[in-house]
Amino acid sequence: MMKKNNEVLVKVQNVSKKFSLDLKTSLKYGALDILKSTFGFKISKELRPKEFWAIRDVSFELRRGECIGLIGHNGAGKSTLLKMLNGLYTPDKGQITMKGKIGALIELGAGFNPILTGRENIYNNAAILGFSKNDVDNKIESIIDFSEIAQFIDSPVQNYSSGMKVRLGFAIAAHLEPDILIIDEVLAVGDLGFVLKCFSKIDELLPNTAMIFVSHSMPMISRICNEIILMDHGIAEYQGNDIGKGVQIYYSKFSNNDEAEVFNNGDFTLTSKSTDLKNNILRNNSDFTLKVEFKINTSKNVNAPLLYIEFKDKEQRSIAGLYVRDEKAFILNCQTILYTARVKNPLFTLGKYTIDIGLYSLYEETPIFRQNSAFEFVVDKEKERWISIELESESAITIN
């Protein structure tokens, strides 16, 4: 049967979900709601004392062939929304409409019976999705091969590692070709080779599937999603198809330099730091200057320590560094020391970056001073790239 393109498979209309702050209150309100329902009284949908909105007034539509990314800090409401989509929670307000078979990878091992074998769980999951035994018989070898756990497939799932559960769960969901596929961060557990294989399979599935993808990895989000929702305390803070804009809001909202880690042995005090970047925006391939000044608290007559400057990307991975050093510079009855570095033709791609700084003795690796996220800046570029550095090259194309 042909699957209609552009068919709306997921429709979420003004959905809200509330929870109680503690178990005692939850049990109390639950019992009251049951009594009211039994005797035909209307149950209030508004907040009561010691309740809060986990999800508040969220709406979106998802068509076949589309993937929506949910991002936000832990506790923002992403998993609660997914559990409502999967039917585990009922909305207190609003309506959710789902069409077709749903495959969900919401939590590690969710949907698996731990005392059954991997093979038996494949048939169980398929039955829940509405597939017959014959359907699974035709696919089971492919599922087992994809999961790469053939030697354990007849062992109880309770003996599986978290990575093995991810492998089996994704293999089942992908090979049963659901109309709607929900993935919640579980791919972060798998090794790199398997994750790449999963993304290849996602590319294969996506034209005929509506996908909801949750991850803290922005490169993963940008890799497959055509729309993004940034959740914050249950509210859709940003929603749209500009993935780059949503990611930039995510990074700017949840990074906090006031909490930057600082180490200091007491010999030097950071007194000032500055750049010549206007509004902390770096234009493509433009030079810029960093200045860092320290007060000298030591009376030792020593060589001036070297300043190490370390650049980190959107994922807080170290991607580049430079030293500011002068072996002839000597501290002798000095009060301050100023370091100046001119960064020439930086090749960073679009996105947010942070800079850690550290002082080190010329002859020892032990730090004298270190501050993480001492600077931050955003690279402004016309075209979005999710690699950190875009190399310059001399290249040519020859056509014969």
Image (tube, rainbow, N blue to C red):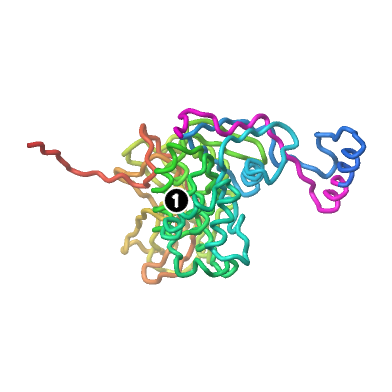
x, y (%) of residue 375? 47, 47
| Position of 375 relative to 327 (above/below) | above
Report the front residue among 190 and 219. 190
Q: Residue at x 47, y 29 (%)?
A: 4
Report the front residue among 302 and 72. 72
Provide the residue designation for mark 1: 355
Q: Decide: few, some or many residues near mark 1? Use Cα within 10 Å; few <14, some 14-19, many ≥20.
A: many
Would residue 90 be seen by someone viewing this image from the given angle? yes
Residue that sits furthest to the front in the current view: 134
Q: Residue at x 57, y 68 (%)?
A: 156
Report the front residue among 309 and 10. 10
Using the rendered view, name the quadrant where residue 29 is placed.
Answer: top right
Would residue 248 be seen by someone viewing this image from the given angle? no
| SS state under label 1 | strand
Q: Which span of residues is magenta-colored?
A: 1-30
Drawn side of residue 98 relative to residue 337, left or right: right
x, y (%) of residue 198? 43, 51
Q: Is residue 23 magenta?
A: yes
Residue that sits furthest to the right in the current view: 39
Residue that sits furthest to the left in the current view: 400
x, y (%) of residue 262? 54, 58
Drawn side of residue 132 relative to residue 196, left or right: right
Q: Quadrant of the C terminus?
A: top left
Drawn side of residue 153 relative to residue 321, left or right: right
For badge 1, the amino acid type reads Ile
| Position of 74 relative to 18 (above/below) | below
Q: Is residue 29 magenta?
A: yes
Q: Residue at x 46, y 33 (%)?
A: 3
